[in-house]
Amino acid sequence: MSRKVPVSREQRDALLELENVIGHGIGYAYVDGERTDHVCVIAFVTEKVPEDKLDEADIVPEVLDGIRTDVIQSGEPQSVDGPYSDADGGPKGSRNDVIRPLVGGVEIYGGDAENFGSLGTGLLKMEDGTPVAISNRHVVCNEDNDCTGEDVFQGSEPDGDGGYDFDTEDQFIGTVKSLGELDDDLSGEDADENLDVAYIELEDPDDTLARMWGLGEMLTPSDAGLGDLVVNNGRTTGLTAAYIEAVDVTINVGFEFGSVALTGLDELGKKVIPGDSGSTYGRITPEGNYRPTGVVMATNQDDDLSWQHPFSDVTDDLGFVERGSFGEASEVGTDADSSPWFESVIYRVEERVGSVDVELLVANTGGSVPDSDVQVRLYDSDESVVDEISILPGNIPSPGEPYLDTYISEGSLDETLLVETTWEYDGNEYTHEDEVSVAGEPAELVDWGRLMQVLNNIRVVDESSDIPDGVDGFYYVIEDGVLRYEGPESMEIASEEQVAELQDSVDELESALGGYEIQKDGDDTEGVINFKTMD
């Protein structure tokens, strides 16, 4: 989906003058607690208040610059680091083991802060070749100190007294290279300078992988868009899936040293918890590879929301990075023989001919493999099992590796699905759960005989875009108003001069496609119709 902003940040800043409004963004409107597909201006408030309890001047207008508004209760976002002594919410799986080769999605600590957090990426490299990984500034720095040059460590063990033991020689991974600004005095346009991100220069890139713990290869980061389904890989929460529900968000975030205005954020419809700071949300490809989209830095657990810096803002401020590859390390693993731990998420929903495919990823984020099957069950909103997968011992992924599967629904889906993973180890049964809303309609088959008759009556103006032969078996999916089909690259079948005479044929074409409106490129005078391949 697009990141286009229909109302500028400067225009939306006027909402911050209203009582109780602490932020704004562009996102989906809600009706009776249900998300709609309507994009609007969002006003974030600490708590929703009936209009009759507000002064008229403090009521959020129904329309801003011609765009509908909606009010979302976000509470007061807080940074999500955690002190070493915090025994509540320990790390998921073996993320606090010494993981070597080093990968993303594991616990880190250090700098001059007494916090633990997450390493958000595996191996990246800057334009000058410097090997780095990414986390939050507030994870590696004590409050708003400049901790550039301080050491960072990965791997810890509880000491039995609520704290942790550190072996700095084995656990040292690098030093803080560069930091985003965090200044509680900046506001308005100046707040664009605030960025809760740190680049960590890695000591041993030859022993670091461009991978994420429990996932596949890590790809070069890029932004996600409004409505995208992304997956977080945090130290404490583990793997969890969420949708991007607002973009270009301006909001105040609470840190230990004060409240800081942050801009350009993505808001996601799921909370994270202390220790997840510095982790990333990202898109997972059909092959199980991971493309980071933003760095998580804040949450409101009561309202089940979190926020991230999109990667374009990160690289604009701290420098371009891309997927790195330096040494001979190839296998992910842990030095500890800790117990197995499994996490499952829905990471992709595909509309196909006659079905909606729900793609699942099961990750072994522990330190070993159980002797018995791993069971994965998918529940619908009525708590009925709609699919069940048994992963046999020979197919159970090794520590740090994923397993992929697909649930195929022959009907439409519009509900919340819960993924439950259970396994036994050392006489005990363990469970992990994650849920996400899923909506989709099976794609329809085209009456290609009728469609070809229509197309043959339309003059093709581009010789390179002849109508393809052998179209039997082709199908279409409507996405963002564009007809996409499996087959040759693309073809333009109309020009400006033909618009009037082609209108009847276009109407017939749309009828042949089940009444869908065909998107026309350009303004109303051009009327070019494009047939594009599926993504």
Image (cartoon, rainbow, N blue to C red):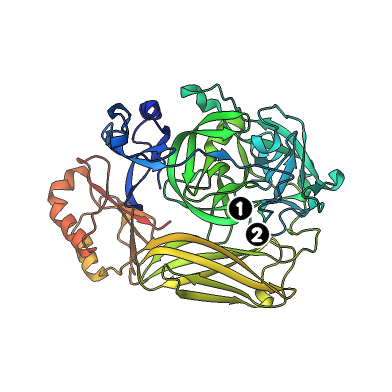
Is the Cβ of the residue at disc 2 closer than 8 Å to that at disc 1? Answer: yes
Where's residue 230, x and y in %? 51, 52
Dot 2, crowdedness within 10 Å: few (<14), some or many (≥20)? many
Q: Which residue is mark 1?
A: 233
At a point 69% along the width and 27% down the height, the residue shown is 145
At a point 48% along the width and 41% down the height, the residue shown is 266
**Quadrant assignment, res 317:** top right
Q: Amino acid at mark 2?
A: Gly
Q: Choose between 207 and 490: the one closer to the eye.
A: 207
Mark 1 falls on what kind of element? strand
232 left or right of 364?
Answer: left
Where's residue 371, x and y in %? 72, 77
Where's residue 70, x and y in %? 33, 41
Q: Residue furthest front?
A: 53
At a point 40% along the width and 58% down the height, the residue shown is 534
Q: Choose between 46 and 352: the one closer to the eye.
A: 46
**Quadrant assignment, res 5:** top left
In the rendered image, the vertical position of residue 382 relative to residue 182, given as above or below:
below
Dot label at residue 441 = none
Q: Choose between 500 and 125: the one closer to the eye.
A: 125
Q: Amino acid at mark 1?
A: Asn
Q: Which residue is mark 2?
A: 214
- Mark 2, mark 1: which one is toward the viewer? 1
34 left or right of 154?
Answer: left
**Quadrant assignment, res 67:** top left
Between the C-alphas of marks 2 and 1, the distance is: 9 Å
Mark nearer the N terminus (2 vs 1): 2
Q: Quadrant of the C terminus?
A: bottom left
Mark 2 falls on what kind of element? loop
At a point 21% along the width and 54% down the height, the residue shown is 459
Where's residue 273, x and y in %? 60, 48
Question: Can residue 486 be seen at all in this image of the molecule?
Answer: no
